[in-house]
Amino acid sequence: ESKGRWDTIWMAGLRDKDPATIFDKLVSGEIPADILYEDDCVFAFKDIKPAAPVHLLVIPKDRMNLKNLRHSSSEHIEILGKCLAVAGKLSNMRELGFGDGARIVINDGADAGQ
């Protein structure tokens, strides 16, 4: 919009034009996943190529123009908090193979193994 009337409203008028990622395809069911947790906002599943004895991924179901954590802003606080809370909940589940604690890692971008 040339008049700039949406400039003060976060993401107003913007569309996520990036192609679907593998994570989008997992959430949509296009690619099957071993789902461990799912609600309206968060999706958690087992990694198909685990790098540890217990390796799961916890992602937002709606990427909200956030395909890399380094692009996050205050508008993402709620969903990022929900993802961490789900990771904490899952890390208490001994039936998944967790013991007394868990290593929780956030990869951000291709150089980090995302």
Image: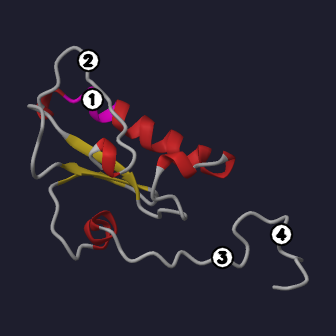
Stretch of the chain drawn in magenta? 89-93
| Comparing labels 4 and 1, the label whose residue is closer to the camera | 4
Q: Using residue 83 as the reference point, say whether residue 64 is left or right of it.
A: right
Q: Describe residue 17's horizontal placement relative to residue 90 as left or right.
A: right
Between the residue at mark 2 and the residue at mark 1, the CA separation in whole angstroms equals 7 Å
Query: Dividing the image into 4 quarters, which one contains the N terminus?
Result: bottom right
Q: Work out whether mark 2 precedes mark 4 in sequence or the reverse, and give the earlier one.
A: 4
* Residue 7, numbered label: 4
Identify the mark nearer the N-term, 4 or 3: 4
Which class describes the residues within 10 Å of circle 4: few (<14), some (14-19), or many (20+)? Answer: few
Marks 2 & 1, CB-CB < 8 Å contact: yes
Residue behind mark 1: 91
Q: Nearer the viewer, residue 91 or 9?
A: 9
Q: Which residue is mark 2?
A: 101
Kindly state the secondary structure of the residue where label 2 is placed.
loop
Residue marked by disc 3: 14
Between discs 2 and 1, the one toward the N terminus: 1
Instruction: Characterize the local packing of mark 2: few (<14), some (14-19) or many (20 or more) Cα atoms within 10 angstroms.
Output: few
Closer mark to the observer between disc 2 and disc 3: 3
Name the main secondary structure of what is drawn in magenta.
Answer: loop
**Element type at marker 1?**
loop
